[in-house]
Amino acid sequence: MSKKFFLVSLGCAKNFVDSEEIAGILIKEGYLLHSVPEESQVAIVNTCAFLHEARLEALETVKGMVRIKNKPGTKLKTIVLTGCLTSYYTEAVLRKMIPEIDLIVPFKHAPIIPLFLQNENIPPLKTGKPLYPKNDRFITGSPHSVYVKIAEGCNNRCSYCLIPFLRGKLRSKALEDIISEVKALHKLGAKEINIIAQDTTAYGKDRYGKYMLVPLLQNISRIKGLKWIRLLYTQPARITAELIKLIAQEENICKYMDIPIQHIDEKILSMMGRKTAPEQIKELYHTIREQIPSSVLRTTVMVGYPGEGEEEFYNLLTFLEQYPFERVGTFRFSPERRTKAYDQGPRVGTQVARRRLQEIMIRQKERSRNFNRRLQGKKMDILVDFSDPKKKMLHGRFFGQAPEVDGKVYLPKSAGRPGELIPVKITGSGAYDLLGERLT
């Protein structure tokens, strides 16, 4: 009888892709994915360690698996820890914190988890490139909307960020492997491909000696029948005129740009180690608005960075008023050991940072509401994500709503089925969500 495994994926979409690759590898080796840990012989926790709260969540999740393992009558025998937590802590520290962990597998070596489980001879674990599986991924989420990770690691070295420490330097996948993966996903029913990496605009530099995001997108956009290609996690310093032109011209590339700027004040940007000056950010904003008039823009900003006084915060607040983004994600600075920012000062008080975050989000909520109001009466294609049996409604999205992070379009249950791309008229709006009805 095949062994069953239970898989928990914590953190970002990039981690979720890793989890699906782990699942695919195990299934290929004869294991069965199961939804109940008590009924599974193996539990795998793929962890996030980006922030202190994420590390706490990861450790508590593992402890939860330990409690299940210790229950009378449970089938769970082996707990596997993988993901970013294995880079943040040494194996000795992890085993001291939770001695009941059976296997600790660095994320780079997740493809050989079956060898660990079978106690076979393990090849030497080198610290260089990860072992990329090819087409072994098992889709556990919506098959019509899928994330595709094009690279691992990051070379940007922003002063507040743990990613280079946790994930290492940039390591791009081969272009032909990505194209093969997208084609395979499309055959399985994918209508939307969400391109992700720690920095998608850096794609190819390490492997090909030059940035290759534009050629990659050109190849993906030629795949017949693929409706939406969404580009996420772009570094503003590397959004080129060529990339903007391609997004404007290609019908199946979503006119949606995710551009995390982090801040706008010159002093704070310099302390953060960001590569884009305020005037460059403003010029980029104007260029996109002019060349892609229908664009929906998302950004991420940080408040409470060391040295951010009222003047620096006011500069950020004013910028967001004068250069409005349809979507804004805001988070407070988190002092993380092993980052340059950990030793920078002066620190901003927690209550002050919370007040600043709330002020941005209150203002952004109104901007989002006004943007949604302008969509009322518009006709657009909506990708149906799932059916909500409790509310008897469908949840869908238009091109300007990325999965998980943006709002939804609510439709009558009779309007369609999950995975369908249907014509809709927007009939109502709120601060983040929309109402619509199917056009006949």
Image: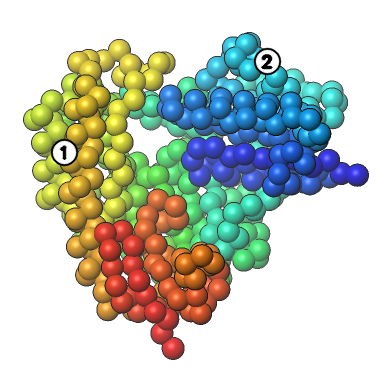
Q: Residue at x 18, y 21 (%)?
A: 307
Residue 423 occupies quadrant: bottom left
- For label 1, the SS is helix
Give whichever of 42, 207 is nearer the camera. Answer: 42
Residue 348 occupies quadrant: top left
Q: Position of residue 284 (x, y in %)?
A: 22, 49
> Which residue of the protein is positioned furthest toward the right in this rendering?
1
What residue would you read off at disc 2? 99
In the displayed structure, would residue 188 be above or below residue 119? Answer: below
Of tags 1 and 2, the one toward the viewer is 2
Q: Crowding at label 2, few (<14), some or many (≥20) Cα neighbours within 10 Å?
A: few
Give whichever of 364, 114 is nearer the camera. Answer: 364
> Which residue of the protein is positioned furthest toward the left in this rendering?
311
Q: Residue at x 29, y 72 (%)?
A: 428
Q: Is residue 104 left or right of residue 412?
A: right
Q: Position of residue 314 (x, y in %)?
A: 10, 36
Quadrant of the snapshot with the C terminus: bottom left
Q: Which mark is residue 225?
A: none
Q: Is residue 235 left or right of residue 282?
A: right
Q: Which mark is residue 316?
A: 1
| Residue 133 shows up from this direction | no
Please, what is the three-letter code of the amino acid marked with disc 1? Leu
Distance from Cα at disc 1 to Cα at disc 2:
46 Å
Please, what is the three-letter code of the amino acid marked with disc 2? Pro
Q: Position of residue 70 (x, y in %)?
A: 74, 26
